[in-house]
Structure formats: C-alpha cells, structure tokens
Amino acid sequence: MPIRRRDFLKISLGGSTLLALSSPLGESLSQSAEPPAPQRHDRDTVLVLLQLSGGNDGLNTVVPFEDDLYHRSRPTLRLAAQRLHKLDAQLGFHPDAPAFGRLYHEGQLSVLQGVGYPDSDRNHDGAMRDWHTARPGLALCPTGWVGGAIDHVYDAADRDLPAVFVGSTPTPFNLQTEKAVVPAIRSLSDWGLAQSTADARPLPSRKRPARSAAAALPSQTHPLLALAQHITRRAWASAARLEAVVAEGRRANPVEYPPFGLAGTLQTVAQLIRANLGIRIFAAEFGGGGIGGFDTHANQAANHGALLRQLSESIVAFVADLRRDRLLDRVLLVTFSEFGRTVAENGRRGTDHGAAAPLFLVGGKLKGGLIGSHPSLSDLDGGGLKFQTDFRRVYATLLDHWLGFDSLAILGERFEPVDFLESI
C-alpha cells in the first residue's frame, strides 16, 4: 500500500502522534526536494492568538463600577468597587485578575473596548465562524483568516513552519489553509524531546540511525529520498535547538508558571519562540474542550472568577518568561471571544449571549491603556453591548502593522487600523 504524504511527514519528523496537518502541501515531490534558503520577511515579530471559548463576560472582566445601570442590571453578579483592581476612576478589573492590573499599569496590557461586528451571530458556531474567517455571514469559506495570511506568504520551498497550534483541543478553523501546513502540538515532547530516566543523555549525543541514514543518501537520488533527507535533517536541527532551549531554561532561573493547563500551553509557546524556528503565528485556546468554558449561563460568579485567575496568572508568567530573554518586544498576544454577554443577568445567576466585548492585547510594543470608551449600558444591541470597533480593523492592524503582511489581499477589503501599537 503506498504511503500517504501525511504519514510520511509524520514518520520523517520523528513519529509525533499529534502532528496535525491542516491541508495537503499540493506541490510535487521534485519541487519539494530542492531546499533553498528559508524565506525571510522584513521583520521577526510574533503573533500569539488566544481564543477564549464560550463568550467571555466582558462586563464583569472590565467593570464599569461607577455606572448605576451596571449594579441594577446585576443584582447577584455585580462586583463592588472596593474589590476591583482599578484602571481609572470608572473601570476596574475583576477581583480575581490582579495580575492583569499589574500588567496594565506597567504598560504591557491594553484593553480595546467594545469589539464586535454588525449583525453579530449569537450562536457559538456561527459567531466563531465569523471571527475565524473574517467573513461575517459567509456560510462557506475554505480558509480561516490566519490560514489565508499563511497561504499569502507561503513558499513551498521554505521549510520553516509559518504557524503552529498549541493545545489538546481540535485545531481552530482560523488556521485552515489551502496550501501550507500547520502542525498542532500539545508540548515540546511532540517534537521528540521527552527523555526517559534510562536515557538522560543530551540529545546530540544519542545514536540516531535515521539521521545517519539520511546523511548517507547520495546527492543524486530519487526525489522522495531527497525529501526524506531534507526533512530529517531539518527535524533533528529543530529538535536540537529546542532541547538546548529547555536545558538552558532549567539552568537560568526559569520563570515559575502556575499549575494551569493554559500556563503549560503558554510555556510551550515561549519555548518555541525562544528556539527561533521561524514560526510567526501561534494559536491557542482556553475554555474549550467541551467543558462550557466562558459560556456562563448559570452560577457565573465562581466559574468566571476561576477562569479569569487562570487566564491572567498564565499570561503574566508568559510575559515574565519572555522578558527574561528580552523577547517581549517581538511578541504580541491577543485574546478574542465569539461574543460578550448580556448586560442583565438571567434568572440562573448567569448571563446569556451578548454582542460586543473587550479584547486584550499583551506585549512590549503597545501604547498601553484603554482604547476607546466603554460602551453604553442603556443603548444596547439585543440586550448586549453595542460594538464600537469592528474586529476586522484589529485583524488589519495585526496583519499590516505587526506581521508586515498585506491585509487587503487577506481580508478582501481595506479596514482602518486601530492605534494600539508603537512604531516598530
């Protein structure tokens, strides 16, 4: 039975059981067998997209504690001003997110208020489809907006990975491509870095029959064997860089991450950034996996607080890790959720699907502070906050001004950028 290209790549990359390819390569083996120098762009900035699945309640994340309508709309969910971590005289972060307050006052976290889009979908699948494709209302779209960006800059001969999904949930649709390959991993062990106690020698000293076999291939050979040689060499080189990064982290007073799943995911992202493998875009998800996440229809108070503590403490550890090696200026983390929640609580001490919500930006090249004014609590969109900033303006800013890609070619139209970045 002929071996499939997907299986061949998995075998060549060390047999990782979690290497998930979002689409076929679509080039001939003879084209792939010639490995010119990796593609270089005009900058080395990195984007980390963090999806808050379920619909985060922005109103109890960034709380308008001076607005009487807030307190009257939420008799059991309202948060008292004295418990909040104040941003200014009107707004404060949730009591369980003090870490966000610290980042905000250090200028490394910005809050973009009232993000959404016209006629927003209140269904989870439909709303997330809109955010993932950046084509609201379009039922059929072959690629996600990130996948379109990857395809736009994709070079079939470039062996650097343009993007990676880190996590154990299914790869989100925003990474769906037509031409490129987007792997999904849980941790660095998926690159073959896990060492048993019986074999704790450094990776470069171990016996590697596959590497020796690849190196022994003649220069003029079958394209499939040449591809195997090239992929194997690149895989071992990447694994060696990653293991060196992990070993150095153990020696150099590593940042202590909290014991949360999201923290482990962001630690993996930080290690991959430090290894400098050429990955420009990372994606991760928090609150998914079929456990409800931010979809807080009932008993919201305790659940939402726990989620925000995990989110904020994980991100603060990630920032400290990057700052340690002066990498923070290269990295921008952006959160998004499919929609916000209703202003009024329901009869189950929870909230229902709303519209606009705040979006959080974290990094070393932000202007910092609040961006835009807080949406009105009296002029609503179906019970939720009205949007003030179309999310596609955020995407356009990330593409044009952070990654250096052409947003028009990717989003299909030009959107006015949002002013949240310092010049880079």
Image: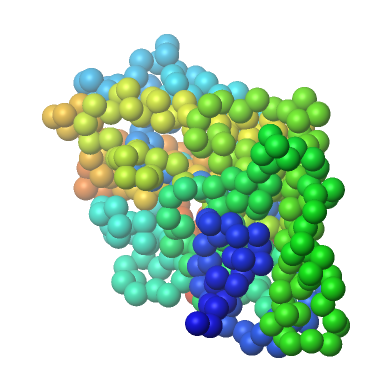
Left or right, 15 with reference to 351: right
Query: What residue appears at the point 58 percent right and 57 percent down from the top-left corner?
Result: 16
Colour scheme of the picture: rainbow
**Depth check: 124 or 191 in front?**
191
Query: What residue appears at the point 81 percent right and 29 percent down from the top-left corner?
Result: 251
Q: Position of residue 327 (x, y in %)?
A: 76, 42
Q: Position of residue 222 (x, y in %)?
A: 74, 87
User: Is the residue 261 above or below the residue 226 in the image?
Assistant: above
Q: Position of residue 346 (x, y in %)?
A: 17, 32
Left or right, 96 with reference to 294: right
Viewer can see residue 356: no
**Depth check: 200 or 106 in front?**
200
Q: Position of residue 235 (x, y in %)?
A: 73, 61
Left or right, 313 with reference to 157: left
**Depth check: 169 or 47 in front?**
169
Left or right, 328 with reference to 1: right
